[in-house]
Image (cartoon, rainbow, N blue to C red):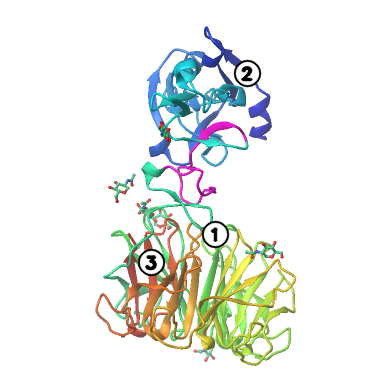
Amino acid sequence: MDIWSYFYLISIINLVCSQDIYQSKFSLSIPGTLYEPANNDAQYIISVFVSSFMQCAIQCNWNSKCRVFDYGAMQSNECRLFEGDIGVLGSIGMSLVPDSKGGLVQLDPFLFTQYGQACSSACVESRYLQCNNDSVCDCMPHTYWDTFWKMCLPQMTVAGAWCQSGVNMCREDLNLTCSAINKCEGIVPASATYGVNIADQSTIIEGDSTNGFDNPGGIVIYGESGDESLIVADSAKQQIVLLKNISSNQAKASVLIHNGTDGTYLFYPSYLYLDTDHQYDLYITDSGNNRILLLSSMQITHPLPTNVAGTFGAGGLSTSTLSAPNGVTLDNQKNILIADTYGHRIMLWSPSATTGTIIIGTGDPGTGSTELSYPMGVFFDKQQSTLYVADSGNNRIQLLNMTAAASDVGITVAGGNGAGSASNQLNQPSGVWVSPTTGAIYISDTGNNRIQRWNFNAAEGTTVAGDPNGGSGSTASRLSSPTGFTINSNETYLYVSDTGNKRIQRFALT
Ligand SMILES: *[C@@H]1O[C@H](CO)[C@@H](O)[C@H](O)[C@H]1NC(C)=O
Ligand SMILES: *[C@@H]1O[C@H](CO)[C@@H](O)[C@H](O)[C@H]1NC(C)=O
Ligand SMILES: *[C@@H]1O[C@H](CO)[C@@H](O)[C@H](O)[C@H]1NC(C)=O
Ligand SMILES: *[C@@H]1O[C@H](CO)[C@@H](O)[C@H](O)[C@H]1NC(C)=O
Ligand SMILES: *[C@@H]1O[C@H](CO)[C@@H](O)[C@H](O)[C@H]1NC(C)=O
Ligand SMILES: *[C@@H]1O[C@H](CO)[C@@H](O)[C@H](O)[C@H]1NC(C)=O
C-alpha cells in the first residue's frame, strides 16, 4: 500500500479563526500511522491528552511551533506535537494501533506575505511569523526564510541534511552549521589522544584454536545499535573475524570464514567492503588469490562465497585478471571498484561480469594524473559519484570523477608533496574515508604511523590519531603502520587496524 498517495488524498480540514492568518490547513495520513521525526529530541514539543483527533489538530493549530502531530499512536488519546516536516525532517511510519493517524500543517506563501514588513502593521498576531526587535516580521524560532518557496521552513535537525550556506538552514542550537559541501555538520571532531584497545594478540577468538590477531587490515562496521560490531580481515591468519558488541559485556570474537571453510580458499585477505544497503553483503579482497569474493547476506547464512572479480590464483594484467588487489568498494550501480595494486590501476567489474574494465592506470607505476603507483584503499562517494584512491606509491590521495567523460584523470586532493611527515605530506597512505557531512578526508598514513584528516579543500592535514610527527609506538597514544580503518555513522568513533601492533584500537573523535 502506498502511504504517500493516500497521505495527500485523504480529507483536509480547516480551522478558521477570526482572521485568515490564524488558519491552519492539514494533510492527514491514513489510519494505522504515526510520525517518525528525524531527531525526536529536537523536534518533539509536547504531548496532551484530548478526546478526539480533531481536538488534537486544534492543539497543533494553537501551538505556533507545531507543524506535525499524531494522535493515539503511543497511548490512547495521546496527542503528540512536533516541529518538522515529512521530507528530510521525518516521515509517516506504520503504527501498531489501527486507528492512530497524523496530520501535517500545509504551509502556503500566503501565510507569510507579511514577512519583512514592519511589525506594527502586520505580524504581531500571526501564527507563522514573529516580531523581531519590535520592528520587522521574521520567521519563528527553528525556521528559516526560504527565498524560493517564500515561506519560513523548518531548519534541519540532523547532520548530513542539505543546506545552503548563508541561509540559516541548520539548527545552530543543536551545534549544526552549514559545511563547505552544503551539509549541516555537527561539531568537527578534535584529535583523539588515547586509543582504547578493542582486540589484540591475546583476544580469544571462537573457531580459532590459536587465538589473537596477527596482521589485522581491512575493517568495517557491522551493526550500530549503540553497541557496534566490527568485521576485520587478518591477512596473516587467512581469516575474517567478527568482533561483536564491542562496547558491552556481550563482546565476543569469532571466525566468520577462514581458509578452508566450506572448501573456500583465502590467501592474504586484505580489504573488506560491507554493502549495508543490501542485506550485509560482504566483499573480501582475497589478495593472494588475485580475486574478490562475495559473501552474500553474511549475517543470515553462510552460503559458499562467490568469485565476483578476478581469476582465482591467476594474477595478471588482462581484463579478466587482477594482480594483488587491495581496496574494494561499490558504486551506485553495484559495480565493484577495485584497487589492483600490482597492476597500478583501478578496475570496474559489473555485477556477474567475467571481465572488468580499466578505469585508470596503465599497468606500470607512474606519477602523472592518469597514472597510479601501488593503489591501496578506495572510497566511493555515493552522493558525488567520485572515487578516492590512496595512491600509496605516490604518497597522495587521488580523486576520480566517475561521471565525467575523463574519469581516468585523477586530481590530487591530499598529499602529493613527496613522502614525508610534514602536515602537507603523506607517506604510503593505505586507506581513505570521506565524511558525508563535512567532506573531510580521513587517511591512514601508514608510513607515518598516524591517521590524518584533510578538511574539504584543505592544503594540509591534521593528525586525529597517532603521533603527528610520524613516530611509531605501542602505547595508547601511538600507532604502528596502521592500515584499515573505519568511522561510525555519527563520526564519534574511529576504529583502526593498528597492524604493526597486531591490535584494533578505538579513538573517540569528540
Ligand atoms: C534587528 O533590527 C535591526 C535594525 O533595527 C536589524 O539590523 C537586525 O537585523 C534585526 N535583527 C533581527 C534578528 O531581525
Ligand atoms: C553545543 O556545544 C556547546 C559547546 O560545546 C555545548 O555546551 C552544548 O551542550 C552543545 N549543544 C548540543 C545540543 O549538543
Ligand atoms: C549486538 O550487535 C548486534 C549487531 O550489531 C545488534 O543487532 C545487537 O542489538 C547488539 N546487542 C546489544 C545488546 O547491543
Ligand atoms: C553515536 O553512535 C553511537 C553508536 O554507534 C552511540 O553510542 C552514540 O551515542 C552516538 N552519539 C551521538 C552523539 O549521537
Ligand atoms: C589454505 O588451505 C588449503 C587447503 O587446506 C591449503 O592447501 C593451503 O596451503 C592453505 N593456504 C594458506 C595460505 O594457508
Ligand atoms: C563530475 O563530472 C560531471 C560531468 O562533467 C560534472 O557535472 C560534475 O560536477 C563533476 N563532479 C565533481 C564532483 O566534480
Where is 366 relative to 272, above or below? below
Structural crowding at the residue carrying mark 2, measured as other residues with C-alpha within 10 Å and reported as few (<14), some (14–19) or many (≥20): few
Work out whether mark 1 precedes mark 3 in sequence or the reverse, and give the earlier one.
1
Q: Is residue 466 magenta?
A: no
Residue type, numbered disc 3: Leu
Residue type, numbered disc 2: Ile
Q: Residue at x 41, y 59 (%)?
A: 491
Q: Is residue 167 magenta?
A: yes
The quadrant where residue 310 appears: bottom right
Where residue 410 appears, as percent x and y from the top left, is 63, 77
Q: Main secondary structure of the magenta part?
A: loop
The quadrant where residue 43 appears: top left
Indicate which disc residue 12 carries: 2
Q: Is residue 372 visible?
A: yes
Please name whichever residue, 491 or 251, is drawn nearer the observer in this view of the structure.
491
Q: Secondary structure at mark 1?
A: loop
Where residue 171 appears, as percent x and y from the top left, is 43, 42
Which residues make up the magenta segment?
Answer: 149-171
The N terminus: image quadrant? top right
Q: Secondary structure at mark 3?
A: strand
Structural crowding at the residue carrying mark 3, measured as other residues with C-alpha within 10 Å and reported as few (<14), some (14–19) or many (≥20): many
Q: Is residue 211 visible?
A: no
What distance separates the C-alpha of mark 2 from that of mark 1?
39 Å
